[in-house]
Image (spheres, rainbow, N blue to C red):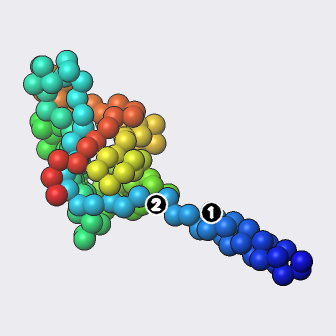
Amino acid sequence: MRKYIFIIVTICFLFVLMICNKNDTKIMTSGIYKMKLSQEQQNSEKVAPTISIDTKQKSFIFCYDALSYYMNIGIYKINDNILTCTTSDDKYHYIFEMIDENTLCFLEEQSSKITIFDTTFGVVPQNGAIFEKIEK
């Protein structure tokens, strides 16, 4: 009888260990992620923001205003499926939740404020904006 109890306890212990070690970390892949636009934005032919990720260099380029001279270039880090992009001059940071390897969700409240010169041409990413991978 003790043998069966020992086996059952061991199996339960191993099961608990497997659950605790479950790794839900998403994998970031290099490529260009483009913000999904609403039908209205698509019809008005607005330029969608993009973020280019280079996993080898751990770098990014975030383009959201074609009329701006400032380039949002820098490095990123990942912690608990949160992608934090910080510009090289440390002036700005942009936060995204990694939904899967092909999808990012912009977290506006945690990010630096984004403004663009002319909303006729571009779109300001709002909280929850989805960026989908378009290139490898």
What secondary structure is found at the residue carrying circle 2? loop
Q: Quadrant of the N terminus?
A: bottom right
Q: Amino acid at mark 2?
A: Thr
Give the x, y percent position of residue 80. 50, 57
Q: Position of residue 121 (x, y in %)?
A: 12, 27
Q: Earlier in the sequence, mark 2 or mark 1?
A: 1
Q: Nearer the viewer, residue 116 or 108?
A: 108
Residue 113 lies in what quarter of the image?
Answer: top left
Around disc 1, counting alpha carbons within 10 Å, would you say few (fewer than 14), some (14 to 19), or many (20 or more)?
Answer: few
Which disc is residue 25 wearing?
A: 2
46 with respect to 87 (left or right): left
Q: Is residue 133 left or right of residue 16?
A: left
Which residue is under mark 1?
19
| Residue drawn at the location 19% of the way across and 51% of the way down | 32
* Camera-nearest label, 2 or 1: 1
Q: Residue at x 25, y 43 (%)?
A: 132
Please state which amino acid type lies under the numbered disc 1.
Ile
- Asked whether the viewer can see residue 118, the reply is no
Q: Is residue 105 left or right of residue 133?
A: right
Q: Say which residue appears at 82% left-offset and 76% top-offset.
A: 4
- Residue positioned most to the bottom: 3
Taking the view exactly as shown, the residue that stands out farthest to the right is 1
